[in-house]
Image (cartoon, rainbow, N blue to C red):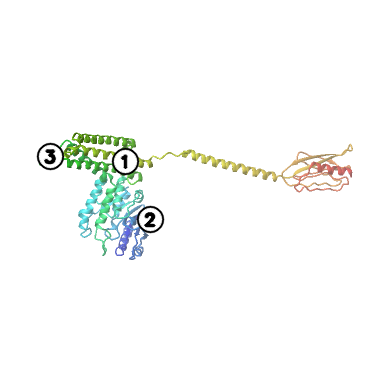
Amino acid sequence: MELSVVMPCLNEAETVETCVRKTIGFFEDNGIDGEVVIADNGSTDGSQQLARNAGARVVPVVDKGYGNALMGGIRSARGRYVAMGDADDSYDFTTLGPFLEELRDGADLVMGNRFKGGIAPGAMPPLHRYLGNPVLSFVGRLFFGSKIGDFHCGLRAFNKESIMRLGLQTGGMEFASEMVVKATLAKYDIREVPTTLSPDGRTRAPHLNTWRDGWRHLRFLLLYSPRWLFLIPGLIFMTLGLIAGIALSFGPVRVGEVAFDVDTLVGAGAAMVIGFQSVLFALLTKVYAMQEGFLPHDRRVQKIIGWWSLERGLVLGGLLAVAGLAGMIASLLHWRINNFGELDPRHSLRLVVPAATALVMSLQAIFASLFASILSIRRRQHPPVVDAAEEAAGVVDAAAHKVASERKAAEAVVEVAEVSAEPPAEVSVEVGAGKGAGKSKTETSTKTGKSGSAKSASAKPASAKPASGRSTTKSTSGKPASSKSVSGKSASGGSGAGKPAARKGGGARKTAADADGEDRAGQAE
C-alpha cells in the first residue's frame, strides 16, 4: 500500500464522515492504493461507526492527547507514506497530490504552509495568526536552523519508516513541533508546499487551548535546545559580569551623570556566577541528551568532554580557589592595616566580591567535573571478560564435540546390531574310516544367507559343499555318503545303517565337539 491518511478523532461526528469520503474520492480519482485510518481517542458521539460506514479503518487509542492519537494511527498505518490531518474538515484532503509527489521524489517530510496557501476568514483566531504561530515558528527556525515557515500546520505527509526512526514521544499538541525539530536535527529532507485552511465544520469549541498549548510548544523548543536555554544566556551573563567586574575593581565608573560603584560590582559578581553555572548546565545537559538519544551527537561537545577530564576540572577549580583565597587574605591584611576596625565598603568590597566570586566558581567547576565524570561512567564500559569471538568459537567446538560423540555412539550400536544379526556358521564333518581310529574333521565357515539343514540319504551319494571347497565322507557301510551344504545349511555324515539322519540348524551353531561325538557314535554302530 502506498498511502495511509491518519486522522485523530475525538467526538468528530459532524465532520469525520465528510473527511473520509473526500479522501477515498481522492484515492479513486488518482488511482492511489491507499487507506483512511481514524485514530479514535475515546469518542462518545458515534464517530467510530460513522467513519466505518464511510470506508475508514478505526484504530482505538487509549492514551489521551493529540500526539498519542496520531502515533497510534501512524503505527497502525499500512502504507509506505502517511499523511496526517485533522478530522474537523478544516483541511482539504483532495489536495494531497503535491504532498505525495514530493514523497515519491525522495522527501522524508512534507509540511503544509497555511500562510503561503491561504487562510480563510474565521479559520484561525487573530492571536494565533499574528502572534502565536509566527513567533513559535520563528523560535523554531532560530533555535534549530529549520527553514519551515509554518511549524504547526496540521496537514503534512511523511515517509513512515523515516518518522518512526525519530522516536517521537510527546503526547500533546507539541507533537507537531517535535516532529519538525527532530527531523531537522536528523538532517532529513524536509520540504514545504502551500496549503489552505478553512473554518472547521464543527459547532463545538476546538480542543486547542491557546495559552496552555502555546506554552507547551515553547517549553518543548527550549528544552530541546540547551544552546539557547543555557549556553547563550550564560555566555552573555559571564561576559557582562566579567567586563563590569574588572572595570569596577579599580574604582567607580561614570557614564555621563550615572556612577557605577561597589553595588554594581556585587551585581557583576552575581552575573559571573549565574553565567558560569548556566554554561556548565548547557554542557551537562547536552552530554546527557546525547547519551539518552534525545539529541544527536555534536562533535564540538564531544571534543570538549574529551578534553575536560575530572583531573583538569579539579585543576581549574583549584586555581580559582587559590585566586579566591588570595583575595580573602588581601582583604584580611587590609582589615589588619585598619586595626580590625570599621572599613569603608567602597574599598573593602573591591577585594571581597572578586574573591568570593572566584571561590564560588571554583566549587561549581569541581562539582560539575565530578558530575560529568558520573555521566561518563555509562559511556566508558569495561570490555567483557571473555571475548565474543572466543566465546562463540567455544560454543561451536562444544557442539562439534557433542555431535562427534553421538556419531560414535550410533556407530557402536550399529556394529552390535550387525554382530547379533550374523547368520549361523556352516558345519562340515569329515569322517575318515580306516586305521580303526575314527577321525573327525570339523570345518566351520560363515556365510550370509539362510540357516541350512543337513541332508543325508542311505545308500545315496550326498555331496557336501562347504564355503572353501568340496568334502566327501564315506560311511562304515562302505557306500559313499556326500553331504551337500547349500548357502547357509549345515550337514553331517550319515550313519552306518544307511538311515537318513537329518539335523536342521535352525540358526543354531554346531560346535566341533558335537560333531566329533556324532562321528564316534556312527562308527560304533
Identify the element where label 1 is drawn: helix
Using the image, tell me which numbered label, if any, was put on residue 191.
none
**Badge 3 or badge 2: first in the primary sequence:** 2
How many neighbours does mark 3 have within 10 angstroms: few (below 14), some (14-19), or many (20 or more)?
few
The picture quadrant where one finds residue 492 is: top right
**Badge 3 or badge 1: first in the primary sequence:** 3
Name which residue type carries label 2: Ser
Q: Position of residue 114 (x, y in %)?
A: 24, 54
Using the image, tell me which numbered label, if any, was put on residue 254.
3
The residue labelled by disc 1 is: 367
Q: Is residue 513 visible?
A: yes
The residue labelled by disc 2 is: 76
In front: label 3 or label 2:
3
Using the numbered discs, state the Cα–Cα distance from disc 3 to disc 2 in whole angstroms: 68 Å
The answer to which of 266 and 427 lies nearer the viewer is 266
**Quarter of the C terminus within the rendering:** top right
The answer to which of 230 and 12 lies nearer the viewer is 230
How many neighbours does mark 2 have within 10 angstroms: few (below 14), some (14-19), or many (20 or more)?
some
Name which residue type carries label 3: Arg
Identify the element where label 2 is drawn: helix
Instruction: Tell me if label 3 and label 1 are in contact, CB under 8 Å.
Output: no
